[in-house]
Amino acid sequence: MLLLSTIAIHSYGQNRTQLKEVVVRPNLKKAVLGTMQKRADYGHGGNVAYPGYQTAFFIPSGRQSGFIDRVGIYIYHKHTFLEFARRANKLQLYLYAINEKGLPGKALLAEPITIQPRKNTYWHWVDIAEQHIVLPAEGVFAAVGWQKVTQTDTGPYVGMTNECDTCSFYVYRFPEDKPVWQKVNLPTKGGESRKQKRKDAFYQNLMVKLEVSVK
């Protein structure tokens, strides 16, 4: 249970001090939601044609309720020698509530988390416990974006998997200069293998996790 308390007030003569409101949490167990795969099938980077491009993955709450303490994103390997030789580009991480259309809606973070990877193929965890973000009952969209994409640097790459055959892929693009979220439908059966069709059509699952303090 969340206990919200205002710690009070001592008077010495006419002096009066009021401390700001604080959040007090009991010792709660942890749950990890999101991708369960440990290694990526391939990597995914930005697109110079879409400077505001984002991709999102929907993480169901699994009937859990509590606070989102940490967000983890899998950083994939760089893919050219030049990228190994220079400092990694930056990546931005977002969390969104689901809207009435089933797409990413209200931003849950006060501002996007900026990540500058220092190594390859590892889980990068960000502590957001101080923001006291409650896990929405419907689940949450976790998304990544690339703000400084160039012709020669579309990274850093993030890990993608084919872990979930029924999960859709969500992209944020700017068709006709109007930013919108789009849900990419799953491929139909027949013809090429389902895995190959998913990869070719960007039906990947973003490798992202939430660590939640469960009530």
Image (spheres, rainbow, N blue to C red):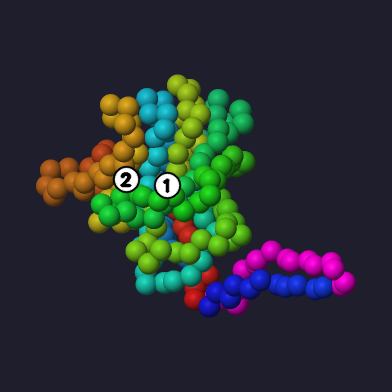
> What amino acid is labelled 2 in the image?
Tyr
**Which residue matches tag 1?**
143
Name the amino acid type tagged 1: Ala
Residue 87 placement (x, y as % from top left): 62, 31
Specify few, some or many for label 2: CA neighbours under 10 Å numbering under 14, 14-19, or 20 or more. Answer: many
Question: Measuring 21% from the left and 48% from the top, which residue is drawn there?
Answer: 186
Residue at image coords 27%, 38%: 200
Image coordinates of residue 18 in percent, x first then y, are 74, 66
The quarter holding residue 184 reads: top left
Q: Mark 2 points at which residue?
A: 170
Q: Earlier in the sequence, mark 1 or mark 2?
A: 1
- Helix, strand or loop for disc 2: strand
Q: In the rendered view, would you say 208 is above or below 2?
A: above
Front residue of this view, candidates 85 and 214: 214
Residue extent of the magenta highlight: 12-30
Kindly indicate the quadrant of the structure image that contains residue 198.
top left
Residue 136 location (% of width, % of height): 41, 63
Left or right of 190, for residue 76: right
